[in-house]
Amino acid sequence: MKNQQDLFVKMVLDQWFTQEKKTSDLFIELTDDQLMNETSPGKNRGIYLLGHLTAVHDRMLPMLDFGAQLHPDLNALFLSSPDRTMDLPAVADLREHWKEVSQTMGAKMNGLTGTDWFARHTAVSEEDYLKEPHRNKLNLIINRTNHLSSHYGQLLYLKQK
Amino acid sequence: MKNQQDLFVKMVLDQWFTQEKKTSDLFIELTDDQLMNETSPGKNRGIYLLGHLTAVHDRMLPMLDFGAQLHPDLNALFLSSPDRTMDLPAVADLREHWKEVSQTMGAKMNGLTGTDWFARHTAVSEEDYLKEPHRNKLNLIINRTNHLSSHYGQLLYLKQK
């Protein structure tokens, strides 16, 4: 049954790394100019989604007990404010932050054991976790993988026809 | 350990049903006119994504050993042809098909045991499955949930501001 736990963790992490790689590849393919475009008229620009995904993933580090956020300054710009309301950092800096968060997360994720993944994530209290054991670290990954996919679908619209 | 298997399955199915419900609610909220709009200039229209998601989910029925596809006629229109190249069915009919596929799938999914979910899906041979046991039914759900999320992100663009 240890095998099945490892298998399940692999299934979930494979999907995370697949979506993460697709998105990283897309960010590399898109030029700075393309990232300044709106994904659809009046909707989020590429640069905003790049910052937003970086901030959401960065905030997962403390939630997974992987350490402090690397760029907590991004939260105010990309989590609590909509696009076009704040002065944003340069695209080049955001590209660097994305890569750094992505690599840090990947390295930490690969270091966890199957059992670690079934422990609660830090945004859930011990008490709530006992009642709702599905609120574990792996479930956070399932959730955030789908969040990433939904924005990936939007970012695809920035590609050249 | 039986409990942990049930917990895995719950985590994956919860995410499927969450994304499925969000998408169904969005289709109900969008008017027929909104569904005729493009999600972004030159990109797929709402009606095409409605048909595409219905066809992709319908095709999961045989893959999960849940029976034959309900609407195999949708495959040519929404899986092998891009938008604006074929005459599409009426939106009202597609809405019905989506609901029917969604309900059929949901009922069948709720009927499987934890062990059933770790069996191979029918698009994988017995031989390949022995070498790659992660290619099971539950993994297909993980995969298709992310596919659904990516199109959900695009469909959101059809909403009124």
Image (cartoon, coloured by chain):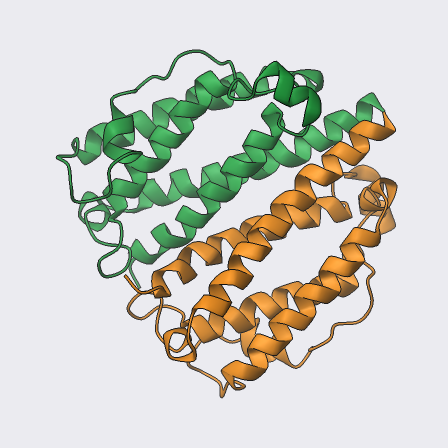
Chain colours: A green, B orange
Query: Residue B151 location, x and y as percent?
Result: 47, 58
**Observer able to see residue B143:** no
Q: Where is B127 relative to B81, above or below?
A: above
Query: Residue B31 location, x and y as percent?
Result: 42, 75
**Observer able to see residue A64:** yes
Residue situated furthest left in the rendering: A87
Q: Residue at x 84, y 45 (%)?
A: B119
Q: Residue at x 16, y 34 (%)?
A: A88
- The C terminus of chain B lies in quadrant: bottom left
Rendering quarter of residue B41: bottom left
Q: Residue at x 47, y 53 (%)?
A: B150
Q: Where is A73 relative to A18, above or below?
A: above
Query: Residue B115 location, x and y as percent?
Result: 87, 41
- The N terminus of chain B lies in quadrant: top right
- The mark tally for this picture is 0
Q: Where is B145 relative to B108, above or below?
A: above
Nearer to the camera, B10 or B72: B10
Q: Residue at x 61, y 31 (%)?
A: A139
Rendering quarter of residue A51: top left
Query: Residue B156 location, x and y as percent?
Result: 39, 59
Residue B35 vs residue A120: left or right? Answer: left
